[in-house]
Image: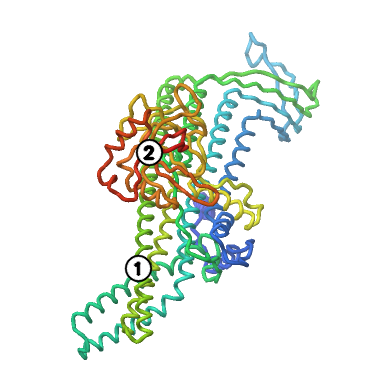
Amino acid sequence: MMQYSKKLIALLVAVAALSGCAIEPEPIKANERLASMLDDQTKIYSKQEPITAPLTFYDALARALKYNFDHRLTMMEAVLQDTQLDVATLNMLPRLAINAGYLGRQDQLGSSSVDYFNRNRSAQLAQYSTSQDASRGVADLAFTWNVLDFGVSYYQAKQQANRVLIAQERRRKVVNNLIKEVLNAYWGANIADRLLPQLDPVLKQAQQALELSKTVEVNRLQPMLSVLEYQRSLLRIIDQLKKLKADLLVAKPKLAGLINAPMHSDFKLAQPKQTPEPPVLKTTMVELENLGLFYRPELREEMYQERISHDEAWKEMLKVLPGLTIPISANWDSNSFLLYNMWMEAGARTTFNLVNLLAAPKMWKSAQTQIEVAQTRRRALSVATLVQVNVSYLQYMKALDSYHSANELNKVDQGIFKVVTDTTESDAGSELERVHAATAALASQLEKEQSLSEIYAALGNIYASIGIDPAVDNIENVTVRTLSVQLEKSLDHWYKGEFPKLPNAPSTAVVTNKAITPTQTLNTQTPAPVSVKATSAPTTVADKPVNTHETSATEYYAIQLMASDKESDVAHFMEKWRADLSAPRVVDMSKSSKPLFVLVSGNYPSRSDAQQALDNLAPELKANRRNRLLPVKMIDNILVSSLD
């Protein structure tokens, strides 16, 4: 009975010990969540320069790059990857270890021996001997170098170096998105600051005019049809204003989130003296596509991933090779029976896992498949990049066209409002008509301003789709104002369509819808700042013209289509007729005080060829009164003389 009791007690003790080691899920307590929330609220907006003046767009973008937490996170991830690279580099070093310890036993080691050829216990020597103390200290300093481990660690360090570059590309992607989002939010908030104060009084007057028109309808003071048409028109304008107001109200909170300002802070935006003219890109679709394929961070990331896959293949193949280990050590033992308590030791050892020979073909095939997957993914992203570049450019052209239409409509509505106001003041007009005209004028002004905001949003999409970002370093150690000045220098060139040039590359054919005869020599130089490359010709993105035979200046003939002192008009006309033209481009012939921009098309070896192409132009294009069609002589992208 006592024996069973002891077993039961031992079992209970074991169960209690095991239950004591069990770990239960422990949710965060309410007071911990509250403390964390208060701490985050304090630290989110800490260590930031206060907003002391109205923000320009460049100020807002500078604050976004410095204080936006999405950007901060990618910067921290880049630092983390860089730290891990240091660790991976150290892993390539040989192993150098110090070992020390103490050994002791209850009874001292004693032993005897027997004759090797006569192993009867009776032949055992009667005397016992010892060669080891009962307690002793030991220590050693061991240097071990495994050649195979060094090779594997080398490729792991190379992979980590590429992960550092991937982290930098992901940071660039966040910068691209920040530029796009700040462009959209800033101009929306800017419009809201300027026009929302005018909106509420006009809406109030419109509602009053609507009620008054209902009174007129009930009392039949005017023809029923005209009253109902007035109400319908006014209701549509009121609905349009309310939708525009709703869109404008969310712009400033979006901007506050992007620049990491408190949601309810009343920061001011710098207001332009007059509505700025929309930026006009002076570049072609082919150039944008090439820029996108060169600068897009996702494509660069996939190239680094392909490098990692290549290194993974070599790393797996190294594991198949024999491993060579070279140990060298300095040893110490306090055993009093030793003649030398300290000694050096060295050796060499090789290990060959034969099973890896069977797995080697599968490992190599798997590594090669990873490389092919990375290449296919990069090509798929290239196609997606081309689609995004083309879509964003078309959205930009649509927004530009919408702005021009909205601008014309705004001029008409403002003129109507002025006429109606003048007649009302002379008691010749109706108060209802004045309110209707005022409401329509404000609605068209809002529509025009929103169209301008959509142009900037479309520009942001173009910048993000081609992947360029302002080259600003050391963001943490510069002030917002200094960073703002740097950004203004970079983005001012972007607004003018002056994007970075690609490195010199061999001439590559571009698939187009227009055939080019072998006798045509095409020029691909892009003079700063306004000339545009041919869109239907094979191009290279280089700083100098490329010719298959020589690099000197090229003479050829083209067709002059139109000329204007407004570059936006020429660019808009070029985009409208681009499908009917061959290699259209804008030539800047401005002088010091007289701006002049000329649209030319084609690249012909002789004047007769240019004249023939002119005769074959679309009738609608030749019938346009704005055109002055004639052959012109060109040297590179410089218009030399008219030939009329």
Residue occupying the point 38% across, 55% down = 400
Q: Earlier in the sequence, mark 2 or mark 1?
A: 1
Instruction: Classify 142 as above or below 534.
Output: above
The image quarter in which residue 405 lies: bottom left
- The answer to which of 570 and 325 lies nearer the viewer is 570
Query: Is residue 59 found left or right of 100 in the rendered image?
Result: left
Crowding around mark 2 (Cα neighbors within 10 Å: few <14, some 14 to 19, many 20+) is few
Instruction: Classify 119 as above or below 513.
Output: above
Indicate the amino acid at tag 2. Answer: Asp
Disc 2 element: loop
The mark found on residue 519 in the picture is none
Res 9 visible: no
Q: CA distance from mark 2 to mark 1?
A: 39 Å
Q: Where's residue 75, x and y in %?
A: 57, 49
Q: Residue furthest top?
A: 117
The mark found on residue 644 in the picture is 2
- The answer to which of 86 and 67 lies nearer the viewer is 67
The mark found on residue 412 in the picture is 1
Res 343 visible: yes
Q: Where's residue 421, x and y in %?
A: 37, 80
The image quarter in which residue 215 lies: bottom left
- The answer to which of 230 and 184 lies nearer the viewer is 230
Q: Where's residue 363, x and y in %?
A: 43, 26
Indicate the amino acid at tag 1. Answer: Val
The image quarter in which residue 343 lies: top right
Q: Are marks 2 and 1 in contact (CB under 8 Å)?
A: no
- The answer to which of 521 and 604 lies nearer the viewer is 604
Query: Is residue 399 found left or right of 618 in the rendered image?
Result: right
Q: Where's residue 15, x and y in %?
A: 50, 53
Closer to the observer: label 2 or label 1? 2
Disc 1 element: helix
